[in-house]
Amino acid sequence: MFTILWRTIKDRKYSLLIYCLSALALIWMYIALLPAMERMADSMIELLSGYPDAFVSMFPINAESFANIENFLAIENYSFMVPILMIFMLTAIAGVSLAGEVETGTAEIILSTPISRVKIFFGKYIYGIIAIAFFSLCSTLSVIPVAKIYDVSYIAANYFTMFGMCLLFGWITFSLAMFLSAIFSEKSRVYMFLGGIYIMMYVVQIVSTLSEQWSDVKYISFFHYYDYEAAIINNSIGASSIWVFGILAIIFTVAGAYWYNRRDFAI
């Protein structure tokens, strides 16, 4: 298993580095822009007030959004950029790890070794968890040194909580992606299905905010449990987020490992 893990790390290290540097660059950019955005706050709020509620719900900006760095990053970085980058990164890792190797024919080489399929699955799975940890670290705790450079006040504890929220969201995303990759023999199908699932969940989350009649549909969306505002602003993670993400991640992981171990490969 650790042989598979080490080989995966060597093969994927540069792509992980690019994603981590992208996350760090976003943090740096937003902190550097904070003073200018504070001056433009009134104009932006006035501009958005003229747009339909459906559009504004995607960018819930108000006067409090520029009150401090936590509020600003919540709306600018953690509401969209961090989850979308994480989804792209983890979908790519999962798609290439299992389905991609079947598609290219390299799975035959790995499966011919005296390593069980379960160990192969978890060797690649552990790499994904490592990638989640590094990306989450760059997306959250990097704020502390960058904020010091620009002399911006921050609440350090909130970023550790946000780090935990990113880990949970990444865990469920990667577990679902690996489950799909264990089922399909083409990485493009993994990308298509996972992308479709998350687009549907994002639309459901928006619809739930527009009408009281549809408010309950939010519970089927992962974005409801990805409560970045509670994490970065209030320094808390709801029990529902922990339970839903944790239980579903375990279910998808076990199901993915079982399917990969039992399936017949058309190689």
Image (tube, rainbow, N blue to C red):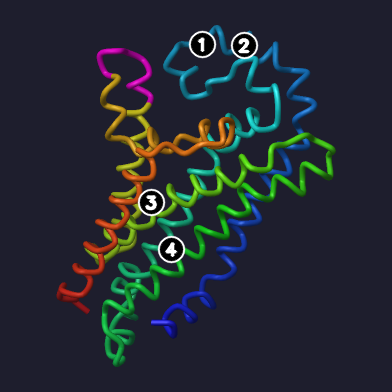
Q: Which residue is mark 3?
A: 173
Query: Are the residues tagged 2 and 1 within 8 Å (C-beta)?
Result: yes
Task: Say if mark 2 contacts mark 4, CB within 8 Å.
Answer: no
Q: Which residues are magenta?
A: 206-214
Q: Residues within 10 Å of mark 4 (few under 14, many from 20)?
A: many
Q: Which residue is mark 4?
A: 93
SS for callout 3: helix
Q: Nearer the viewer, residue 47 or 176?
A: 176
In the displayed structure, would residue 89 be above or below residue 118?
above
Q: Residue at x 51, y 11 (%)?
A: 51
Residue under numbered circle 2: 47
Which residue is at the front of the view, 100 or 86? 86
Identify which residue is drawn at 62% across, 43% down: 159
Give the Cα separation between the discs numbered 1 and 3.
Answer: 32 Å
Mark 3: few/some/many CA within 10 Å (<14, 14-19, 20+): many
Kind of residue indicated by mark 4: Ile
Which circle marks residue 51 in the picture?
1
Dominant SS in magenta:
helix
- Residue 244, position as x, y percentages in the image: 31, 44
- Marks 2/1: CA–CA distance: 8 Å
How packed is label 1: few (under 14 Cα within 10 Å), some, or many (20 or more)? few
Upstream in the sequence, badge 4 or badge 1? 1
